[in-house]
Amino acid sequence: MTDVCGRTIDYLRLSVTDLCSYRCRYCMPEDGVVKRPHGEILSVEECVEIGRAAVDCGVRKIRLTGGEPLVRRGILDICRGLRSIPELEELCLTTNGQLLPRMAAPLREAGVDRLNISLDTLRPDRFAYITRRGSLAEALEGIAAAEAAGFTGLKLDTVLIGGFNDDEIGDFIDLTRHHPWSVRFIELMPMGECAGWDKGCFLPNRAVLDACPELVPAEPEGVARRFRIPGAPGSVGLISPMSHEFCAQCRRIRVTADGRLKGCLHSREELPLRGLHGEALRSAIRQGIARKPIRHHLTERPSDTPRNMNQIGG
Ligand code: SAM
Ligand code: SF4
């Protein structure tokens, strides 16, 4: 289905929980979030029903996210349910990787096609600092487990934070010389926990190209501009919502863990889907697509959404 600006909307990011095992400083408050009663969060059946209805409205790719999707009870049932939708072309999941050592193989068996693993630093002390409770060793074990389970084309997502990890750009790019991974740098977006952070933290992705003149352009992928080191097995992606607005190419809608459809990550507008079934559900999704905002306003002001990223699903 196309929206009012003629954008084809075929990608749903479905958040299955707002809980997480980490407390990344830019994403979640130190004390985490209050665990909500079971009934306030989409059930396994509702996740699959919404996925099915979205596919009926033209969605062909679903990404499960959160919070941390792997802490969600029933995550494998959600994956199996979505995978059984014949027209769904791609089922992906974004994770901090911590639980992959035991979950990678079951996820593969449940039909997940691709994984994105978030990794903001390659230094153990910095990893512990930014996540407030994770360890680099377990994240690296998670990546190894994903490969052992047969996931190919792994994407490693790194939020670039000035004064924190910008001196590691070269180390991340070096990973692509030895592994067939796509290392993607994401510009930090001013929302929730980091909305008021110092300006110096918000680095344009140009810093990546400046740090590595060896990079040459490659085929773009979704909203990511891509580059590679000539001859390297991996690639480098730049996701630049701040400096290189990609709203005109945006093909996605989002559903929060409490069942509200968002046309844009940064908009306040939300459309409740819970309690809707069949044609009423499909019609609400179509309405959400039709009302998708033309663009965000991050270059003029912080995000309009009052939610933290873990509550929407990054
Ligand atoms: N817990 C999973 C993970 O970390 O991959 C999935 C959810 S997390 C919200 C999804 C992605 O959003 C992560 O790569 C995270 O680094 C990114 N993210 C969170 N807050 C962000 C912000 N303010 N700006 C840019 N990316 C952000
Ligand atoms: Fe959790 Fe992911 Fe947010 Fe970090 S970025 S706190 S891992 S949801």
Image: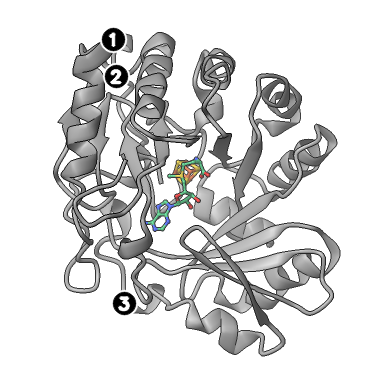
* Residue drawn at the location 33% of the way across and 70% of the way down: 245
Please say if the residues under marks 3 and 2 sit with CB atoms less than 8 Å apart. no
Residue 39: which disc? 1
Tag 2: Cα neighbours inside 10 Å, few (<14), some, or many (≥20)?
few
Residue 171 seen from this side = yes
The image quadrant that residue 279 belongs to is top left
Q: For ligand 2, tell me if the residue under mark 1 lies within 8 Å.
A: no
The image shows residue 213, relative to residue 240, as above or below, that is below
Residue 36: which disc? 2
Q: Report the amino acid beneath label 1.
A: Gly
Q: Nearer the viewer, mark 1 or mark 3?
A: 1
Q: For ligand 2, tell me if the residue under mark 2 lies within 8 Å.
A: no
Pointer 3 or 2: first along the chain:
2
Q: Nearer the viewer, residue 247 or 304?
A: 247
Tell me where residue 233 appears, x and y as whole percent. 82, 65
Tag 3: Cα neighbours inside 10 Å, few (<14), some, or many (≥20)?
few
Q: Secondary structure at mark 2?
A: loop
* Residue drawn at the location 79% of the way across and 58% of the way down: 180
Q: Report the amino acid beneath label 2.
A: Arg
Tell me where residue 184 appears, x and y as whole percent. 58, 62
The image shows residue 55, relative to residue 135, as above or below, that is above
Q: Report the amino acid beneath label 3.
A: Lys
- Residue 149 falls left or right of residue 187: right
The image shows residue 218, relative to residue 283, as above or below, that is below
Residue at numbered disc 3:
199
